[in-house]
Amino acid sequence: ARRRTPGHAPRPFFVASMFGTPFCGPSLRGAALALVAAAVAVQTTLAFLPPQNPPWGPDWSLNGSIISMAANRSGWFDVSLAAQFGVVSFDWSNAKAQWANAHPMDCEERMLTQARRTKAAHPAGHVFTYANLVKALPWLTTVRRKLLDPACSGFFLRFAPGGGFPNGSYHVPPCTAGKCSALYHDQEQTPEHPKGDGDCEEECDCGPGLPCGEYLWDHRNGSMLRDFLVNEYIGGPAYLGSPAISGLFIDDFWCSALVNGSKACADPVQGPSEINRYSQLDMGLSDADIAAITQGWLETMTAVQARVLELGGFTWSLMLGQSNANAAPVMLPSDPKGCAALLQGACQPGSSEQIQLQSAPLLFGLNASHGNASVPLPQLEQDVAAFLLLRGPSAFIGWGQWGLTWPVGVSWANQTNKTVLLPPLLRSNFGAPLSNCSQVKPGVFRRAYESVVATLDCNSFSAQLTGAP
């Protein structure tokens, strides 16, 4: 998700009458504290599943490997552009100007429609959409149904009775336009009227009586919440239960100073990522509470990843180096030392780096020249050569320092400029490799494919893509 400056000032609001007895299942707070004590004592944490290749099998072609995280905030993403990618991953902000003004908001339905249209235009491609296992976003219908069901209020974290301040107020407002909720929510990345992260022309509609905001899953709820998230949400008909959707970007993460280390949590502080920095105070959570939720989230993420693979899908967090909702590609440095350092291990026969790159997909980023539309990809041949040297049977290449189109993009992605599309080189298919990468002399790396030999000379920072051997 995109960063915003932390928002609303504290507002005095007393909500004692809104705090009733939960839940959809018993409260697990006491049990969670006991369970987390042992984990905290040894400072351990569960891991995600190890990186692995997608279940749909290898694709050595460049045109099948080009990836984009796509969004057109004003409306539908142009299908003729989306269909040029081997993988296109639609962000929640796609068509936000439309779904933010629906009654109620229908982001989920529009993501599914966008996926269906794109899949119909490019049946061989893979379409991903967006999910969030930290934030319970009410503009997603599957989530909103649970937020509106009093029997399932235990799925969600709550404002602490008595407020986050001594005077009983909170750092974020529990009420908007007369709608109030005792379930914790902030407005960091939330459509609002008249202006917000998405502009509502009228009062925003997230469902009857429900103020719009970013609610939070309470992963201490255990198996009941996990079963819903794994099967009804991720495996449901609007997500991987749809034949149009091949995968998901699963956003955000929990971080605990007790579990992850005191210096590990900086987005912005320990707790849920990209949520108001005072959320711990407003929810009345102890450090042990946050540790318990973090452990529960990790268990759920592992179960979700396994279910995604069972359903024949894939998720960004199964790529190499892509834990904690990252989308940060490997980038080729243009200086000789940095260039060689990136390639030496991977081009050493039998090295751990070479073995790893064959067993799980690389996410590789093209260097873009922003503000120079005439040369949007100034080292395209060098980047493609490096990708061909490094890649395994499944790998992805796109551009942008993060997210592969945003927060920065290049001119071809401008929806009003349909004449600048994918460069011909990125639509190539050079076949399967005939060898692994090798260093043929200091700073010079080479690999042969069925119809090309890729050579990258880091000393002069020059690339050659010559005919088949």
Image: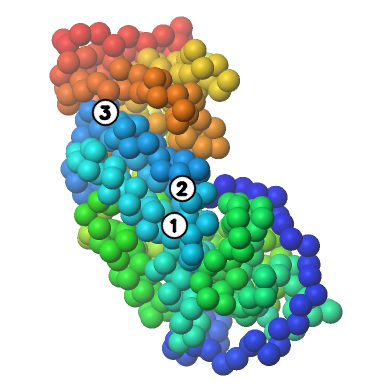
Q: Which of the pair 198/234 is nearer the observer? A: 198
In the rendered view, would you say 231 is above or below 464? Answer: below
Q: Name the residue under label 2.
A: 95
Residue 89 image point, x, y percent: 37, 44
Task: Give the labeled residue for mark 1.
Answer: 107
Distance from disc 2 to disc 3, alpha carbons, whole Å, reads 26 Å
Q: What residue type is labelled 1?
A: Cys
Q: Are marks 1 and 2 in contact (CB under 8 Å)?
A: yes
The residue depicted at 52 percent of the width and 56 percent of the height is: 100
**Dot 1, crowdedness within 10 Å: few (<14), some or many (≥20)?**
many
User: In which quadrant of the rendered view does residue 127 lie?
Assistant: top left
State the image coordinates of residue 33 (x, y, percent, origin top left): 56, 81
User: In the rendered image, which quarter contains the C terminus?
Assistant: top left
Question: According to the image, label 3 marks what residue?
Answer: 63
Identify the element where label 3 is drawn: helix
Q: Distance between the residues labelled 3 and 1?
A: 29 Å
Is residue 48 positioned above or below 52 on the image? below
Q: Earlier in the sequence, mark 3 or mark 1?
A: 3
Residue 54 left/right relative to 70: left
Q: Nearer the viewer, residue 267 or 238?
A: 238
